[in-house]
Amino acid sequence: MRLVLLGAPGAGKGTQAVRLAKQLGLVHLSSGDILRAERAEGTELGKTAERYMDAGELVPDDVIVAMMAEHMAKAEAAGGYVLDGFPRTRAQAEALEQRLCGQSSGLEAVLELKASDELVAGRLSGRRVCPACGRVYHLRNSPPREAGRCDQDGRELVQRPDDRLEVIGQRLKTYHEQTEPISAYYREQGLLKEVDGDGEIDCVSARLDEVCRHLTGVR
Ligand code: AMP
């Protein structure tokens, strides 16, 4: 099974994709996480991506498509995937479709988490992450037990460079201009399912579960 999770940065894609993948026995493929890992390792790809990411802009399509093709191929063998953060442009969506053409089945569904700019800006600016284990917190909504430290390993929490207020505006602009239009592309194909992304994490998960229950082939 292959699913895509769409939505603005901060709409909750990452959190919900992890849960969905676990529940459905799929591989979670986050283009943002893959890029951050490449950066941490200092690879050529990571170096290429760096300046786009820190400016809140998109990494060029050809770079992303090649990177995701490699990861998708591995995930296919493991039974399928939940794509999080990919595709993000019409060209990426078309590249994905082309790739899937040769497969026995295509995308099962595209789930779009809907959230207002105001809501996602508040989520992004308050987000803090553990640099060691990757656990995500929010200063107000889900703070760590000890201020500024990870509950799991005690490491000092950090703010992603692109979660700084001055970059958030650019990320939302990029989203509205380049990513939002692909909802219409998937709607035309009858694949799009819209889900309200406002509310507690469990509440949004329950809405997604409900949608997934109605998909063919979901256990
Ligand atoms: P994310 O963690 O999904 O918010 O992604 C962080 C950053 O990585 C984005 O702001 C982009 O600079 C880059 N990125 C992630 N996925 C893509 C993609 N599919 N296409 C282009 N750039 C991407």
Image (tube, rainbow, N blue to C red):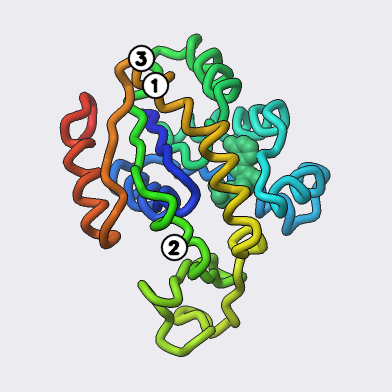
Regarding mark 2 in the picture, which secondary structure is present there?
helix
Task: Please provide percent x and percent y for residue 133.
Answer: 54, 69
The residue pinned by badge 3 equals: 189
At label 1, which amino acid type do we have? Tyr
Q: Nearer the viewer, mark 2 or mark 3?
A: 2
Task: Please provide percent x and percent y for residue 65.
Answer: 64, 28
Placement of the N terminus among the 4 image quadrants: top left
Residue for point 52% across, 66% down? 125
Regarding mark 3 in the picture, which secondary structure is present there?
loop
Q: Nearer the viewer, mark 2 or mark 1?
A: 2
Q: Alpha carbon of mark 2 to alpha carbon of mark 3: how far?
A: 31 Å
* In-image side of 207 versus 66 (left or right): left
Residue for point 62% across, 49% down? 170
Regarding mark 1 in the picture, which secondary structure is present there?
helix
The residue pinned by badge 1 equals: 186
Counting other residues with Cα less than 10 Å from the Cα at mark 1, is it few (<14), some (14-19), or many (20 or more)? some
